Image (cartoon, helix red, strand yellow):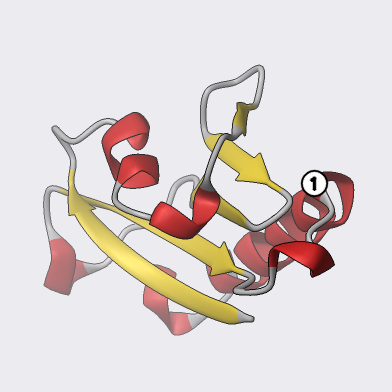
Amino acid sequence: MMANLQWWSEDVSITMVADANPQLGPAEISTNGNFYYSGTGAVVRVKDCKNPSHTRQILYTSLRVHDSHLGDASTMKKLATAYTKAVADTDECA
């Protein structure tokens, strides 16, 4: 498994961010539009994350599982939610 933080320009859609994460594969989008996930990956927008080093950018978390036999969409959704909440509480979101 791989976990990443990705700063993207604020004019880039989450769909484009998700498309840049090929391990995500066919994914579901959350009802609020801030979250793509599948059994093999997830991309989540970190809400209200501000960082003076990344003005006019939005922080996303991404998770990837390289073995599709291990993938489970429900588990990935829970893991990505917990990881993103933890990132929001770090210095990355000062």
Q: Would residue 94 be visible to someone looking at this image? A: no
**Residue 51 at x, y percent in the picture:** 26, 67
Q: In which quarter of the image is residue 69?
A: bottom right
**Residue 83 at x, y percent in the picture:** 67, 68
**Residue 72 at x, y percent in the picture:** 84, 54
Compared to residue 35, the image places residue 20 above or below, namely below
Residue at horizontal 21 percent and vertical 53 percent from the top: 8
Q: Would residue 28 be visible to someone looking at this image? A: yes
Q: How crowded is mark 1: few (under 14 residues within 10 Å), some or many (20 or more)?
A: some
Residue under numbered circle 1: 73
The quadrant the N terminus occupies is bottom right
Compared to residue 91, the image places residue 68 above or below, namely above
Q: Which residue is most to the top?
A: 31
Compared to residue 25, the image places residue 83 above or below, namely below
Residue at horizontal 18 percent and vertical 36 percent from the top: 12
Pick the residue in front: 25 or 32. Answer: 25
What amino acid does circle 1 point to?
Answer: Ala
The quadrant the C terminus occupies is bottom left
Q: Which residue is most to the front?
A: 69
SS category of the residue bearing label 1: helix
* Number of numbered discs visible in the structure rendering: 1
Residue at horizontal 67 percent and vertical 61 percent from the top: 85
Residue at horizontal 80 percent and vertical 46 percent from the top: 73
Relative to 17, 57 lies left or right: left
Q: Quadrant of residue 17?
A: top left
**Residue 15 at x, y percent in the picture:** 35, 31
